Amino acid sequence: MIPTGLDKADFYNFVSERIDNFHNRRLEKLKKLTLSDVLLRKNPYLFKAKNMEVAADLIEGIMQAFLSSSEEMMFGEFLEELAVYVAEKVKGGWKSSSEGLDLEFDFDNMRYCVSIKSGSSWGNSSQHKRLKTNFEHARKVLLQTSSVKAVQPVLGICYGRAKKVYKHNYLFLVGQEFWQFISGDADLYLDIIEPIGFKAKEKNDLYLHERAKLSNRLISEYTTGFCDPMGAIDWQKLVSYNSGP
């Protein structure tokens, strides 16, 4: 059930528009992909270690790794945008002006400042330290405002499972607990699924059609450029192209 303050039609329209944008960006990324993109950005040593000697398998493996990471990033941006939208509608939240933070709202005499990440595997140790610094800075600045009496930093993760805990100086919320925190609805994380699936088959059928064309083209280009006259992969040439001067 969509929580009070979040109009069901508006919510579905928001998700449908943004998910349509995701599919369009995903398709454009696919159409612009070149053999150089595929060969320069992935580890050729790994594919040799996996004994990938069939050109089609090699190209498919590299292509899949490249496109998957790109899709994760784009879909993560969608989830983060959705979370801000929900908090704005239900909690009266707004886009934070603090560095590295995404959202602020007031509730029960507390100012919550929130950093939103799609999944729990985000960032390296330096980025985690930077987030802690950003939270500390935001708390210091906000407490100088007469209308703010208390500040609680929050790291919200859109999917996954973990216990609600306080880490360093912030509250750590994951999956269902995060969506409930910004909406007041324990089931919102389930309700999101329905509008996300709007036209999913139609969009994915088109994507798979274009992906097959791209795969055929890249395999042809790769076989011409990186296989010897007998059809074997020229690993020396491939590694030189990827990592040579």
Image: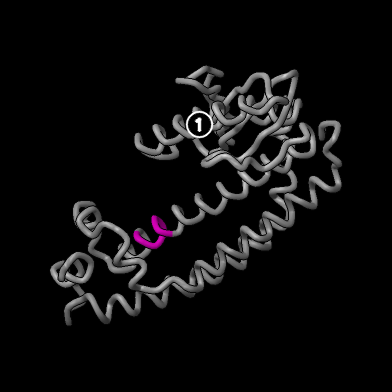
**198, 240: nearer the viewer:** 240
Question: Picture coordinates of residue 159 (x, y %)?
Answer: 57, 35
Q: What residue appears at the point 72 percent right and 43 percent down from the top-left corner?
A: 85
The answer to which quarter of the image holds residue 231 is: bottom left
Count of numbered circles in the view = 1
- Assign the N terminus to one quadrant of the image: top right
Q: Nearer the viewer, residue 115 or 176?
A: 115
Amino acid type, residue under disc 1 in the picture: His
The residue tagged 1 is: 137
Q: Position of residue 125 (x, y in %)?
A: 35, 34
Image location of residue 127, percent across then percent down: 40, 38
Label the magenta part by its dominant secondary structure. helix
Q: Which residue is located at x 60 percent, y 33 percent?
A: 114
In this rendering, the answer to whether 202 lies above or below 124 is below
Say whether residue 208 is magenta.
no
Magenta stretch in the rendered image: 62-66
| Front residue of this view, candidates 30 and 107 | 107
Residue 27, image quadrant: bottom right
19 in relation to 106, above or below: below
| Residue placed furthest toward the left | 236
Rendering coords of residue 89 (x, y %):
79, 39
Q: Residues within 10 Å of mark 1 (few under 14, many from 20)?
A: few
Q: Is residue 61 above or below residue 228?
A: above
Color style of the picture: one colour
